Amino acid sequence: MKQNSTQYGCSIFTSRIKIKQLRKIIYLVIAVVILILICGCSASHTSTTQKTPYFPVQKEIPSEYMLALLSGKLVNEGGFLRVNGDGNSSPLIIWPYGYSLEVSGDQIWVIDEKGQRLFAVGDTVKLGGGFLGTADAEARIGQALPPDAAGPYFIANPQ
């Protein structure tokens, strides 16, 4: 008996079509992968966003204020806003109740309770307030400080 090449649903002609379609799919997948790699690489080099630093805020308005003065440059050291002053220490600032942080492009701004920009990282600042130990700082913010948030701590008064 003569065997028919189409007996099992496959002829030489349909095999060639399937191979051509398979090649097109493979080329399309390769092109998509290359496009994803190119877009991913270029995006990683043009990104200018910064990680938002830790920003501890007092949980309530205090009944009394401390009267020490801290002046120096506001810096972002390892994700913590500190003031580099005259001494060897760079205290971590505990911000007044209602203050917040704004990241705008490459700048990080401290915002007061009225929504006004007070100063940016890199500015020279003068803050009234006082130094606190770890337990007092945690009590003022109502939570534990991160383990890598080393002191000293300075509780700032509203501007």
Image (cartoon, rainbow, N blue to C red):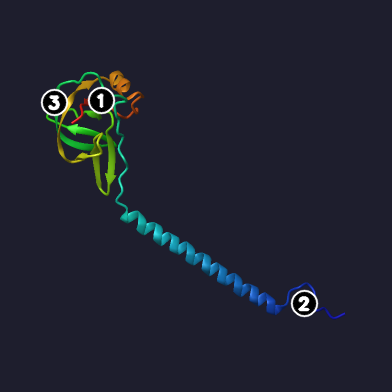
> Label 2 amino acid?
Thr
* Residue behind mark 1: 151
User: Sequence-wise, which precedes: disc 1 or disc 2?
Assistant: 2
Marks 1 & 2, CB-CB < 8 Å contact: no
For the residues marked 3 and 1, what is the alpha-carbon distance in whole angstroms? 17 Å
Residue at screen point 20% across, 26% down = 157
Q: Is residue 44 above or below residue 1?
A: above
Q: How packed is label 2: few (under 14 Cα within 10 Å), some, or many (20 or more)?
A: few
Residue 14 image position (x, y, % from top left): 69, 76
Marks 3 & 1, CB-CB < 8 Å contact: no
Residue located farthest toward the left when viewing the structure as drawn = 86
* Residue behind mark 2: 6
Residue at screen point 56% across, 68% down = 25
Q: Quadrant of residue 86?
A: top left
Q: Nearer the viewer, residue 98 or 67?
A: 98
> Label 3 amino acid?
Leu
* Residue behind mark 3: 69
Q: Nearer the viewer, residue 61 or 26?
A: 61
